[in-house]
Image (cartoon, rainbow, N blue to C red):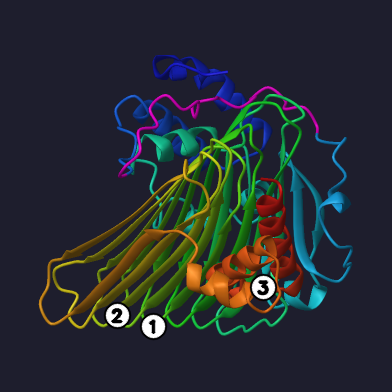
Amino acid sequence: METKVSEYAAHKDALTAFSHGLQEPEWMLEMRLDALDKIDELEPPVIERLRYNRWPLWQVPNLTGAPSAKDIDPFEFIEDKADANRVIQTGNDTVIETLPESLKEKGVIFTDLHTALREHPELVKEAYMTTAVKPDRHKIAAFHAAFMNSGLFLYVPKNLEIDEPFEAVFIQNSLVEDAFVKHVLVYADSNSRFNYVEKFLTKGDKKNAANIIVEVITKPGAQVKYSAVDQLGENSTVYFTRKGYTYRDSHIDWALGVMNGGNVVADFDTDLVGEGSTTDLKAVGISSGRQVQVIDSKVENYGNHTEGNIFQHGVILDRATLTFNGIGHILKGAKGADAQQESRVLMLSDKARGDANPILLIDENEVTAGHAASVGRVDPEEMYYLMSRGIEKEEAERLVIRGFLGKVIQAIPLKGVRDELVETIERRLTSR
């Protein structure tokens, strides 16, 4: 269900009616229509070692009343934990939303994006596609800004530290044909601290596009641990954008499991703007079948004494392709900045294709930077050691892979999500 770029302007009236039907503020409609006009003018983002111009990413969502996802049981995908800080969405609908009154009274907002636009429009306006990802960034961003059809807003006020993680579960409704254009906005005010855990899943096997943008904005001194397990279906063609923007002395810790079944671009970026701000990005990926996945991770150091670390490990099965692009960019004026990265790919098939591309761009003196990259097979010495102790070959191979991916798994704060990621890895390995 691919729409030609030249046809986007024809959706102006339907888009206006869609926005009015959701009672969006006028500035939101203006942003949508402005982005609609820019789609034709902008180029798609350039992803190293990938040509995706023929991928069906331009599916316009249903703007006249998307089919309900009432046939999807959310408890098929979660443990029933009534007291969790949780939002669950099936398709475009929010079906579960739980947040203790004690947190609401302190000013925490954790709700679907359309509700936030109605009830907290000025707060959303401060951050929505104004700082981390702007609509004119590229064609994908403009398309998203125009046609966003569902999302989530999390705001944690100043000086508030929360121990219980916030959980979000997004279930793509592929029982019907409808594009999944989801936006997640995480806004951490000054000196706040919390964990946020996210899952993307698919129910159904219709061929659908997904255009997902996540923005994480950390004001001065804020600390956010962001964990995600992505398991969108094999018939979903996905462009994933996760972008962080850090103010002075703030930190974003990313732990990402890229376990989707279809062709995927995962574009993970962080702008270290405030002096002394830091980020750690840890990502693991598995590609199988004939799947093509590219994980494009970039950290840009703008501020003095900023520090960015990228750590990526991936496993490739069958005839699949997995590419890691790691980009560290220290800009002019970022004195004392540090950019480090490691990308490693493990291939379990002679027909698999893997690549690890480290890129360092240094525009300033008095900085430190480094990279490591490798593409290879399971270490025969590790296999020999395990098998010499009576462990069967297949089990030994799984143990090696678990260790290879373990650093990211252990960084996820919720045990249930860690266990699910391990189970997903085991399932992908044993289904060969």
Q: Secondary structure at mark 3?
A: loop
**Which residue does the image show at 13% across and 68% down from the upper left?**
332
Identify the image quadrant of residue 395. bottom right
Front residue of 187/2: it is 2
Kind of residue at badge 2: Glu
In the rendered view, tell whether residue 133 sits above or below residue 144.
Answer: below
Main secondary structure found in the magenta portion:
loop
- Mark 3 or 1 closer to N-term? 3
Q: Amino acid at mark 1?
A: Asp
Task: Check disc 2 and report the residue beneath it.
Answer: 275
Closer to the eye: label 3 or 2: 2
- 354 above or below 247? above
For label 3, the residue is 107
Q: Residues within 10 Å of mark 3 (few under 14, many from 20)?
A: some
Q: Earlier in the sequence, mark 1 or mark 2?
A: 1
Cα–Cα span, label 3 and label 2: 27 Å
User: Left or right of 133: which side holds 426?
Assistant: right
- The C terminus sits in image quarter: top right
